[in-house]
Amino acid sequence: MGIMDDKDRTLKLRAYPEPAKSVVPQAKPAEGLDRSLELAKAQLEEEKSKTLELLKTIVQLRESLKQEQAKAADLEAKLNRLVAVEDNQLAKKNAQLEAEMKRSLDLMSTIEQLKENLKQEQARSAGEADRTAALEAKVRDLSALLGKISSLAAAGKTVSDA
């Protein structure tokens, strides 16, 4: 009854049964037989009708399945493209962050060097301030000594003039 086609993988059902091979001829069917024969024919017609409806439903479901599979393939392709775009953006952001981190580390290193240079300059300035104060004290001492020498020279000149 059912034959499987490898290409479509669909189950093929016969809508109409094959006629019986051996029919016994009767001369006069009885009235009860006629009635049961009519009922059987009516049932057969009803079964044919149901079978055709089911076949139509199967065809519609196959078409619907194909459409859904196409939609799913489209959605999967879109998803893959979105994932690729996100991965690309993520890679760019990671590269930017790494560059920014490297720049920040370089700037921190420069700041540390500048702090060290400032400390050295402050220490040098403090040493120069001490030396300047010492030199100013020496200049005052020498100025005072020069004043004494000048006054002694002036006194010596007055003594020699007198």
Image (cartoon, rainbow, N blue to C red):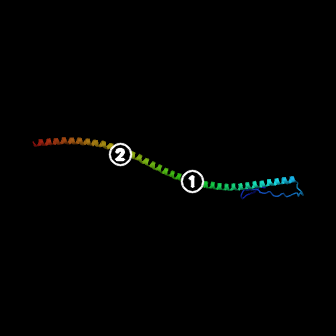
Q: Residue at x 51, y 51 (%)?
A: 93
Q: Is residue 88 left or right of residue 114?
A: right
Q: Which is nearer the eye, 33 or 79? A: 33
Q: Residue at x 23, y 41 (%)?
A: 140
Where in the figure is residue 32, as x and y percent of width and height?
Answer: 86, 52
Where in the figure is residue 75, as x and y percent of width and height?
Answer: 61, 54
Q: Which is nearer the eye, 92 or 99? A: 92
**In the structure shown, which secondary structural element does the residue marked by tag 1 occupy?**
helix
Tag of residue 3: none
The residue most toward the left is 162
Q: Is residue 76 left or right of residue 91?
A: right
Three-letter amino acid code at disc 1? Leu
Q: Is residue 80 left or right of residue 53?
A: left
Where in the figure is residue 62, as x and y percent of width and height?
Answer: 69, 55
Where in the figure is residue 29, as x and y percent of width and height?
Answer: 88, 55
Residue under circle 2?
A: 121
Tag of residue 82: 1
Crowdedness near tag 1: few (<14), some (14–19) or many (≥20) residues, C-alpha within 10 Å: few
Three-letter amino acid code at disc 2? Glu
Q: Residue at x 37, y 45 (%)?
A: 118
